[in-house]
Amino acid sequence: GALAKDIEHAVVALRQGRSLYLWGMPGSGKDALLHAWSYYTRTPTLLRQVTPGSDIESWFFSRAFNEKGTYWEEGEVLVALRDGYLTPTGKRVPYLFVVTDFDRATREQAEHLRLITDSIQGRVNGPMGKIERIFPGTRIAVTANTSGAGDDRGRMISANPIDASILDRFERTFQFPWMDWEDEEIICRNKFPVLAQRSPEVFKKLGRATVALRKAIVDGELYAEFSHR
């Protein structure tokens, strides 16, 4: 269905090294796609989740101290983006850097990601205003429930508008719709194997109800969300 086509285009963009902004309903497979890409391509992945009010700057650098006094300590994200992943053979390879719930970021939090989403420069902020080059081949992807313009339905109330100049830095944007029930039924059967064994006919009934509910939601007749979660 429509989701399969979006996933195909997103995978092509990943292969080409494009930065991605993936958004859509909960349970539409945004994060799952990136996990699958990491698994099937054996790409080391660094995952971070945005929590409103948390200190994103510490991902990159922070102040620390020892017996000699204070000093700047480089964060895991800065080191990973700049140096890549060190394999057991001693070779360095690029990361896939994934930020989930990106539309929950405050204005200050989003600013820390401005440079690394710049596809032309490929840079990251270091301590003392130093700008570091990103390791060649590093991919950047974020996931969100909204398009970055804020929540227009009142269902994702923690979503914030994202600066358009930051959104424009993403080379590819995809809106993921809900899965077709034929695909989602497989997930549900695997989530509830005992139920699937004892009452397999339940999933056909659930499928008809799911399709009807989602049509009502899309048509604006029902104010709700509905996923296999």
Image (tube, rainbow, N blue to C red):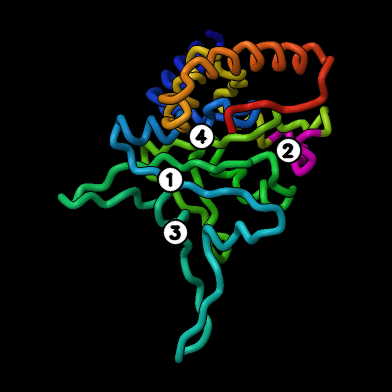
Q: Main secondary structure of the magenta part?
A: loop
Q: As shown in the figure, which amino acid type bears the numbered disc 1? A: Ile
Distance Cα–Cα, label 1 vs label 2: 23 Å
Judging by the rendered image, the residue that carries numbered circle 4 is 31
Judging by the rendered image, the residue that carries numbered circle 1 is 134
Secondary structure found at label 4: helix
| Extreme residue in the bottom direction | 67
Image vertical order of residue 94 relative to residue 13, above or below:
below
Question: Viewer-proximal residue, 120 or 146?
Answer: 146
Residue 220 shows up from this direction = yes
Distance Cα–Cα, label 4 vs label 3: 21 Å
Judging by the rendered image, the residue that carries numbered circle 3 is 76
Which residue is pictured at 72% across the width and 11% down the height?
215
Image vertical order of residue 91 relative to residue 175, above or below:
below
Distance Cα–Cα, label 1 vs label 4: 23 Å
Q: Earlier in the sequence, mark 1 or mark 4?
A: 4
Was residue 160 drawn as part of the magenta stretch in this picture? yes
Range drawn in magenta: 155-165
Disc number placed over residue 162 in the picture, else none: 2
Distance Cα–Cα, label 2 vs label 3: 25 Å
Disc 4 vs disc 3: Cβ atoms closer than 8 Å? no
Q: As shown in the figure, which amino acid type bears the numbered disc 2? A: Ile
